[in-house]
Structure formats: structure tokens, C-alpha cells
Amino acid sequence: GWKGGAMVGRAVVNAVAGMALRARLQRSGLQARAQALGQLGVTRPHVWKGRAGLLDLDANMHMNNASLVYCAELARWHLSGTNGLLDQVLRQGWLFMVGSQHFLYRAPVPPFAPYEIH
């Protein structure tokens, strides 16, 4: 259905945004900063910022837990593009595999509120 296509599209947009950030730093002569991006998710935390939209809300008017899990997947795609892992995956013909996930829901996310995924 259309939602599946939109999900793939959003994942691609986040991956390409991460790759573009890395490329922009390399082109602008900030090679050391671009190399530091390679440590994101390993020795340095990656923070992905989002905002709860209307389609993310449930009947209680806060962000649905399933939407948060999906946004965590978008954050993972952004991280893989930013730290250079996606480049290696594409070159080597590898596939990503998630073995485990753990979520800590600290507070409900109200409509249009900003949130971060670490």
C-alpha cells in the first residue's frame, strides 16, 4: 500500500541526508570532522531529532509507540548514512540485520512536540 512506499521513501531520505552531510564536510575541507562522523554510534552518540505529526498520534492524542519505533528506524538509517556504514554496505553488497531492540518510553510525546532519539 501507499504507507509502505512512504516508509521506504522516508528511510531513503534519511539515509541520503546523512550521506550528504558527510560529503559536504569532506568537500569543504573539514576532513577531520568528516572522519569523526565515522565514530558516531560507536564511541560518540548519535542524536536524531523529530517532531510528532498528526499521523503519528493515537486516540489519546500523543505519539503512538509504533510511530516511535518507526522513527527509531529512520534514525538508524540516518546514522548509517552519516557515519559511512551505508557506503560500505552498498559497496560490499551486505545487508543490515537488527538482532535486538530496547525502548525506554520516558514520557508521552504530545502533538507537534519535538523529541530526540539517542
Image (cartoon, rainbow, N blue to C red):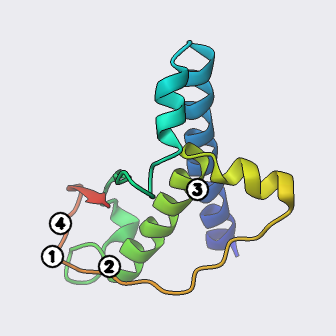
Residue 66 or residue 83, whichever sits in front: 83
Amino acid at the residue labelled 1: Arg
Q: Helix, strand, or loop for circle 4? A: loop
- Mark 1 near mark 4, Cβ–Cβ under 8 Å? no
Residue at (37%, 69%) from the top-left corner?
56
Mark 4 vs mark 3: in front: 3
Image position of 29 with respect to 42: above or below: above
Q: Helix, strand, or loop for circle 1? A: loop
Mark 1 vs mark 2: in front: 1
Q: How far separated are the C-alphas under marks 2 and 4?
A: 10 Å
The residue under label 1 is 106
* Horizontal side, residue 6 vs residue 51: left or right: right
Measuring from the top left, give residue 110's x and y in whole percent: 17, 66
Q: Helix, strand, or loop for circle 2? A: loop
* Horizontal side, residue 115 vs residue 3: left or right: left
The residue under label 4 is 110
Q: How far separated are the C-alphas under marks 4 and 3?
A: 22 Å
* On-image quarter of the C terminus: bottom left
Give the quarter of the image for residue 67: bottom left
Amino acid at the residue labelled 2: Asn
The residue under label 3 is 10
The residue under label 2 is 64
Q: How far separated are the C-alphas under marks 2 and 3?
A: 18 Å
Amino acid at the residue labelled 3: Arg
Q: How far separated are the C-alphas under marks 1 and 4?
A: 13 Å
* Horizontal side, residue 87 vs residue 112: left or right: right
Q: Earlier in the sequence, mark 2 or mark 4?
A: 2
Measuring from the top left, give residue 99's x and y in whole percent: 56, 86
Q: Earlier in the sequence, mark 4 or mark 3?
A: 3
Mark 1 vs mark 4: in front: 1
Q: Earlier in the sequence, mark 1 or mark 2?
A: 2
Image position of 96 with respect to 104: above or below: above
